[in-house]
Image (spheres, helix red, strand yellow):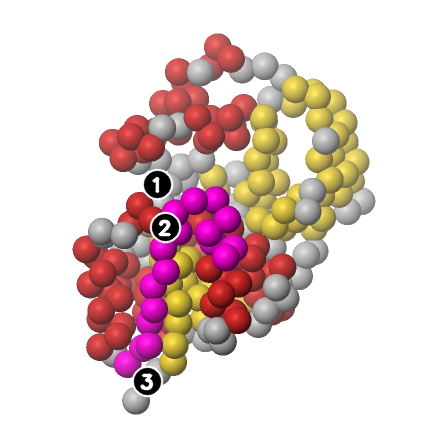
Amino acid sequence: MSKGKALLILHGKQALNEEVRAAVMLKREQGWDLAVRLTWEAGDAQRCVDEALEAGYTQLIAGGGDGTLRDIAEAIVLHSSDASLVLLPLGTANDFARAAGVPLEPAQALDLLDVAPQVVDVGEVCGRIFLNMATGGFGSQVTANTSEDLKKVLGGAAYLFTGLSRFSELSAAYGELQGPDFHWQGDLLALGIGNGRQAGGATCCARRRWPMMGCWTSASCRRLRKWSVR
């Protein structure tokens, strides 16, 4: 008897990951109707979520890093869907997964399909949904400019290496922030708005501790914190 059906939206770089393949096959042997779709370019995550919800999937899996998780979670929230989302962490730093206590081993992560979903809040900055951390300034430049080859070799330390190599480019930028009962404007070097606890390769940026174990329903996601950044 089938335990249910779920769709894994997998980052294209992980298509040949044998651990992921073995974990998927194991869940199928356990009775799950588990399908897999790959992303190739920008916009694919949104398209995959659209097609999954239209096909009646109520359990989705984000297979990738923090960026993949954000893209898929945003698509679910914008649909106002009651689908639940499991994270299969396959990124460089996996900041959200580590802070939330999500297992990093593929088979253990997929076992969260058998765990009841929990509700979490999401953040929103300038109309963009995020689960972990919205960043700006020098930190976001480092993230954007860290090469894939370097991340393969150094893992999360690649961000630190890139930051040090570009330290001479560090300069302040003017910013204005508007949020709930908050307004600030002035020069800043780096900006971080945290819904999760850590970013940039396990750097702790917020005190909040996540109560869940990586599976939640987006139906009750509340946009409690809206921010405007200029």
Along the polypeptide, which appears first: circle 2 or circle 3? 3
Q: Residue 201 location in percent, x, y?
A: 40, 37
Q: Magenta region: which residues?
A: 31-47
Point 75% across, 43% down: residue: 179
Question: Tag 3's secondary structure?
Answer: loop
Residue lying furthest bottom: 1
| Residue, disc 1 | 92
The vertical placement of 49 against 54, above or below, is above
Q: Report if residue 120 is visible in the image.
A: no
Q: Amino acid at mark 3?
A: Ser
Q: Is 44 within the magenta?
A: yes
| Residue, disc 3 | 2
Q: CA distance from mark 3 to mark 1?
A: 33 Å
User: Crowdedness of circle 3 by 10 Å Cα count: few (<14), some, many (20+)?
Assistant: few
Point 31% across, 77% down: residue: 32
| Residue, disc 2 | 11
User: Crowdedness of circle 2 by 10 Å Cα count: few (<14), some, many (20+)?
Assistant: many
Q: Residue 14 location in percent, x, y?
A: 29, 50
Q: Is residue 224 left or right of residue 100?
A: right
Point 23% across, 52% down: residue: 17
| Quadrant location of the C terminus in the rendered image | top right
| Quadrant location of the N terminus in the rendered image | bottom left
User: Crowdedness of circle 1 by 10 Å Cα count: few (<14), some, many (20+)?
Assistant: many
